[in-house]
Amino acid sequence: MQISDPVLYGEPRMIKRGSDEIMQGVYINGIQVVCRGKVSNRLGREKLGTVLFHCRKSNKLPMEQ
């Protein structure tokens, strides 16, 4: 599922629902922002990286085109 995340100023974010498991750690640009379910106070306050977008024009790799 994809949502517009207000923390990311409305940028799309992929989420997964229906699982009791929690990620042990999340890193952005080498900086740990989630550790054992606890979110760092740096997340949403500092620019840690950029949002990645996929190419919507084609599913082919550049070398296949």
Image (cartoon, rainbow, N blue to C red):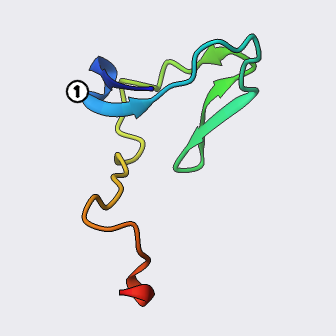
Residue plotted at (30% across, 28% down): 8
Give residue 56's quadrant in the image: bottom left
Q: Is residue 19 left or right of residue 54?
A: right
- What residue appears at the point 77 percent right and 17 percent down from the top-left corner? 21
Q: What x and y, as percent, mark residue 62?
A: 39, 82
Depth check: give the residue in front, 39 or 12.
12
Q: Where in the figure is residue 14, as x and y percent of width and height? A: 45, 32
| Quadrant for the C terminus in the image | bottom left
Q: Secondary structure at mark 1?
A: loop
Q: Quadrant of residue 25?
A: top right
Amino acid type of the residue that numbered disc 1 sits on in the rendered structure:
Tyr
Q: How far from the left and from the top, in percent, is residue 33? A: 57, 30
Residue 13 x/y as whole percent: 39, 31
Residue drawn at (57%, 23%) of the image: 16
Between 42 and 3, the one lying in front of the other is 3
Image: 50 above or below 38: below
The residue that disc 1 covers is 9
The N terminus: image quadrant: top left
